Image: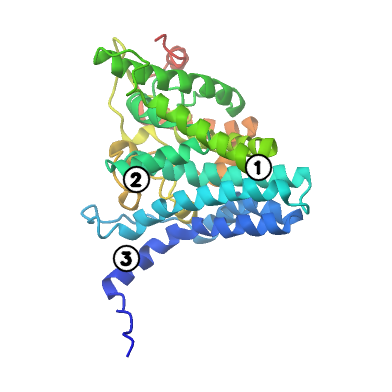
């Protein structure tokens, strides 16, 4: 007689049911293949689902103000962690499977092929880079390696060094390239941050080596690993899809980077830490990050919108990130999907956000009456 599989204990079922909403992102994988197989109008589904559907769900489902138990064990968080681990091979197989499939798919025109990989870039940026952000903050070496794999797939490996060594230390100050300045439109922010973040990431790693009396080109510099992984993925794209495969790979990487920097733009726009003199700034506080408690987009972005708590406890896993109310931290009027779309239109963005920044200044820094002098410091400091 064959034995019946053991039933899942009720406690594990409860853990799974609580984690399942965060697994919605995995539905984008089969959707991508459906779009590739059908072509035509279906290709538009990838950005529409990621941007518009979750914006609509936010409007319908509202806010989630509840906080998870900070004492949750690793066992309690298993199903949450698993989705970030599964995503890495799923993205790898989808990205490079499509690079092999699409160049020989006769039912797809050149425009459809490029449009499809635009949609893939929306996914590898919105989900892939976000999951790499979660993984890079963990102490587990496997998770940190998987973060590097995801970033190499979008040719943005230096983001790990920039984020961990520069952004978290200097957020809200002129030394952080990805803190968007007040009144700085995204179209000015984007080319600036592309240039400055690479420079600041490389310098941060070189400075760490210099403190150990090692040259920048020492083999322990992670940039060697970054460049090696990126070249490997470019070579794999060439092998699987030829030069068209390389072009499609570059399209998705460019879109993914654009998606990341849109999020960086909105997370700290116009928020500054008080300058204490002698190049010193106050400690990072909850009011130095914009937050959003919108339920559906927090499912999609694994609680990235609880951004104040992330800066308070950077290695805290996403399920236990705490929500901050309007009395503790500034709140965005909509979730990230809507706000990133608004950021693409600077006049609209300024109309929405500039009054909120001015109110933030009155609330937290009423003693600062001349912000024009302070804003002059919001340009990159010489290194």
Spot the residue most to the front.
239
Circle number at residue 241: 1
Residue picked out by circle 2: 324
Q: Is residue 81 left or right of residue 238?
A: left
Within 10 angstroms of label 3, few (less than 14), some, or many (20 or more) residues? some
- Between 57 and 31, the one nearer to me in the picture: 31
Q: Position of residue 201 (x, y in %)?
A: 41, 22
Residue 295's place in the image compared with 166, above or below, is below
Q: Eyeballing the image, is 87 above or below 229?
A: below
Name the quarter where the N terminus is drawn: bottom left
Label 2 SS: loop
Where, by quadrant of the figure, is residue 273 drawn?
A: top left
> How many angstroms separate mark 1 from mark 2 (CA)?
47 Å
Mark 3 lies on residue? 15
Labelled pair 1, 3 in contact (Cβ < 8 Å): no
**Would you say the residues marked 1 and 2 are in contact, meaning their CB atoms lie under 8 Å apart?**
no
The secondary structure type at the circle numbered 3 is helix
Q: Say whether disc 1 or disc 3 marks the residue closer to the N-terminus.
A: 3
**CA–CA distance between discs 2 and 3?**
24 Å
Residue drawn where x is 59% and y is 50% of the image = 97
Tell me the residue at 29%/79% (across/down).
6
Q: Is residue 198 above or below residue 75?
A: above
Tell me the element at label 1.
helix
């Amino acid at each position: 007689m064959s034995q019946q599989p053991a039933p899942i204990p009720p406690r594990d079922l409860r853990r799974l049911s609580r984690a399942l909403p965060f697994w919605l992102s995995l539905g984008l994988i089969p959707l991508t293949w459906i779009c590739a197989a059908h072509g035509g109008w279906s290709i538009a589904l990838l950005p529409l689902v990621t941007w518009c559907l979750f914006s609509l769900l936010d409007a319908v489902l509202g806010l989630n103000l509840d906080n998870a138990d900070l004492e949750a064990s690793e066992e309690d968080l298993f199903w949450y962690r698993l989705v970030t681990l599964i995503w890495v091979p799923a993205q790898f197989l989808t990205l490079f499977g499509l690079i092999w499939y699409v160049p020989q798919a006769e039912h797809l025109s050149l425009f459809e092929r490029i449009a499809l990989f635009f949609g893939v870039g929306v996914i590898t940026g919105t989900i892939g880079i976000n999951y790499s952000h979660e993984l890079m903050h963990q102490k587990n070496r496997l998770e940190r390696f998987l973060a590097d794999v995801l970033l190499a797939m979008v040719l943005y490996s230096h983001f790990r060094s920039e984020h961990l060594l520069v952004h978290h230390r200097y957020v809200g100050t002129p030394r952080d390239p990805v803190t968007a300045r007040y009144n700085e439109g995204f179209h000015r922010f984007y080319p600036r941050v592309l240039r400055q973040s690479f420079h600041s990431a490389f310098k941060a790693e070189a400075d760490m080596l210099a403190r150990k009396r090692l040259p920048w080109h020492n083999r322990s510099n992670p940039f060697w690993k970054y460049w090696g992984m990126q070249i490997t993925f470019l070579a794999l794209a060439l092998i699987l899809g030829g030069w068209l495969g390389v072009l499609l790979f570059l399209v998705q990487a460019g879109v993914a980077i654009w998606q990341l920097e849109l999020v960086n733009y909105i997370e700290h726009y116009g928020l500054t830490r008080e300058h204490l003199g002698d190049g010193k700034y106050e400690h990072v506080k909850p009011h130095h990050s914009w937050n959003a408690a919108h339920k559906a987009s927090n499912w999609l972005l694994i609680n990235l919108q609880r951004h104040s708590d992330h800066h308070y406890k950077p290695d805290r896993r996403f399920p236990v990130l705490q929500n901050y109310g309007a009395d503790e931290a500034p709140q965005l009027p909509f979730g990230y999907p809507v706000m990133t779309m608004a950021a693409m239109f600077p006049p609209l963005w300024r109309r929405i956000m500039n009054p909120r920044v001015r109110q933030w200044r009155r609330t937290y820094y009423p003693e600062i009456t001349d912000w024009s002098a302070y804003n002059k410091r919001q340009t990159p400091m010489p290194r």
